[in-house]
Image: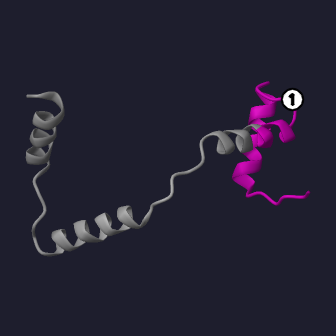
């Protein structure tokens, strides 16, 4: 398999090999892929997307909350403060 990488990614891989962290560029890529397999990126589900849409609608209507107020509510709820 041949893979074309952006120059900055190639530099990063070369730096990892030169620093002795990996024996070859292939090992760097294998480590990255193994990490993705163990901890795949989170995907937003329909509920997440609906919550984001509702939040944006609330902000557009001027219903946003002050961060200090939100922080205080969360502290009361989860820390009993």
Is 51 or 23 nearer to us in this picture?
51
Q: Secondary structure at mark 1?
A: loop
Q: Residue at x 72, y 50 (%)?
A: 9
Residue 37: give x, y in percent of width and height. Answer: 68, 44
Query: Quadrant where the C terminus lies?
Result: top left
Q: Quadrant of residue 51?
A: bottom left
Q: Quadrant of residue 28?
A: top right
* Number of numbered tags placed on the structure image: 1
Q: Residue at x 10, y 42 (%)?
A: 73
Examine the rendering and report whether any part of residue 12 can be seen: no
Residue 42: give x, y in percent of width and height. Answer: 51, 52
Magenta-tinted stretch: 1-30
Examine the rendering and report whether any part of residue 54 can be seen: yes
Q: Residue at x 83, y 36 (%)?
A: 27
Is 50 or 29 nearer to us in this picture?
50
Confirm whether the magenta stretch covers residue 18.
yes
Instruction: Judge from the rendering whether residue 63 lies leftward or rightward of residue 11; answer left or right.
Output: left
Query: Quadrant where the N terminus lies?
Result: bottom right
Instruction: Judge from the rendering whether residue 17 lies leftward or rightward of residue 46; answer left or right.
Output: right
Q: Name the residue tied to disc 1.
A: 23
Residue 71: give x, y in percent of width and height. Answer: 14, 41
Residue 5 vertical position relative to residue 78 in the rendered view, above or below: below
Instruction: Judge from the rendering whether residue 6 lies leftward or rightward of residue 72; answer left or right.
Output: right
How crowded pointer 1 is (Cα within 10 Å; few <14, some 14-19, many 20+) is rated as few
Residue 69 vertical position relative to residue 31 in the rendered view, above or below: below
Which residue is most to the top? 20
């Amino acid at each position: 398999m041949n893979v074309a990488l952006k120059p900055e990614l190639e530099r990063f891989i070369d730096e990892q090999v030169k620093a002795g962290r990996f024996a070859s560029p292939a090992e760097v890529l294998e480590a990255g892929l193994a990490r993705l397999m163990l901890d795949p990126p989170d995907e937003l589900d329909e509920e997440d997307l609906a919550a984001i849409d509702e939040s944006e609608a609330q902000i557009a209507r001027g219903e946003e909350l002050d961060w200090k107020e939100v922080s205080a509510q969360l502290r009361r709820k989860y820390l009993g403060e």
